[in-house]
Amino acid sequence: MSSIKGVFGNISVKRISPTDGQYFFGYYDIQPFSADSSMHLVHKAPFANRLQVKGDICEIGILKGNKYRIIADTLAWNFQQGSMLQWNPLSPNCEVIYNDVEGDAFAGVVLDIRSGKKRYLERPVANVSMNGLYALSINFSRMYDFRPGYGYAYFEDEFKNVNHPKDDGVFVVDMVNGRARLVLSLEDIWKLSGKYFDSDRKLVINHITFSPDASKFVLLVRNFPKPGVPHRTCVIVCDREGTNPKILCDYCYFSHYWWVDNDTLVAFCDGDGLSCGGEITNYVYKISDNTGYKLSDKFFKGEDNHMSLDASGRFMLNDTYPNELRIQRLCVYDTEKDSNIFTGGFYSPETQIIDIRCDLHPRWARSGYIFTFDSTHEGFRGVYEIDFGEAAL
């Protein structure tokens, strides 16, 4: 165990993964802890110096105490979000959900960790609702062509040469019977948002999540960039059935976000397309009236970050990308005191391939003030834990 100096004194940092490989969990908005908090899900990659390609297998396991147990492996994974590994909300101590290859397609898998029994979903999951009844699915092959760190390498996109196909887009999966249906196509999205471009563009859905009550979802639509021109992001919110789509923010700079409640998002963007537009900073977005409100300048110091609220709704966990010294900072924002609490800085070795980088992606436990994060500051990928409880008092 190591220790780092924070503004409240010594905050302990504990590595919970072994040292015999490249361990990581994945994204910041997925719950890694079982319902009883005794188990933490993890991936073990066979390498960390290149992108995943077709045929590369990643282990899936459970950390419990000081032990690691393999429960499965997968051909559908990447370095930023893994295999979308998570606990099944309908059975959060006994079943896990992840993506894999089944036959001639990607599919979601629901695995009983006690019996080893699996059942397959018609499509891979990009997000599972908090009530466990629904999942959102997108085209991970298309994502691999756009950003390999978020897509899967096994199958070629069947719509590769179509800019905005009518048969691809957002699918809703019934988590009980496993069936999937297309609710919002990329062609629908182009008809809604294409007016912001001066010519036809190839679109892809990058990030997508349900609201807490699963009545609606938000999706980030991005265009495949032209050489030397960065992609832009359109933010769309619509009902679970794909009805009543609404553009929250047109094609601007928009990256990470978090559902505060069923009607509110906190996000990092430049505010383009809204009356609150200005320099790149953080905003709270009220979906009901399509407005944005700038947060305090103390909030993450205006840097892009992965943010998440704890169970109480008071503390917002956040991180940064490496600075000029290759240090990634980890902080907790106290919404009541309007202050950002530094909890540590972690060295991030430089990599020539951006999509194999290791973001901290901090994640709160289900209760209390414990959180975990991924890091390479010891020279390998590992999963680390911080108990923020004492500093939170």
Image: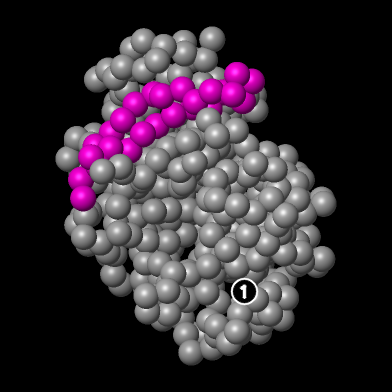
Residue at horizontal 69%, vertical 50%? 276
**Which residue is more in the foreground, 280 or 257?**
280
Where residue 237 appears, x then y in whole percent? Answer: 72, 59
Majority secondary structure of magenta residues: strand
Residue at horizontal 31%, vertical 30%? 345
Q: Name the residue under label 1.
A: 169
Q: What stretch is highlighted in magenta?
A: 325-350
Q: In which quarter of the image is the C terminus?
A: top right
Please state if 236 lies on the left or on the right of 298 as rendered.
right
**Which residue is more in the foreground, 360 or 81?**
360
**Which residue is more in the foreground, 64 or 327?**
327
Q: In this view, does 239 lie above or below 227?
A: above
Q: Residues within 10 Å of mark 1 (few under 14, many from 20)?
A: many
The kind of residue tagged 1 is Gly
Count of marks, rendered view: 1
Where residue 215 appears, x then y in whole percent? Answer: 78, 52
Where residue 2 appears, x then y in whole percent? Answer: 24, 20
Q: Is residue 342 above or below residue 87?
A: above
Q: Is residue 346 above or below residue 263?
A: above
**Which quadrant of the figure has residue 176?**
bottom right
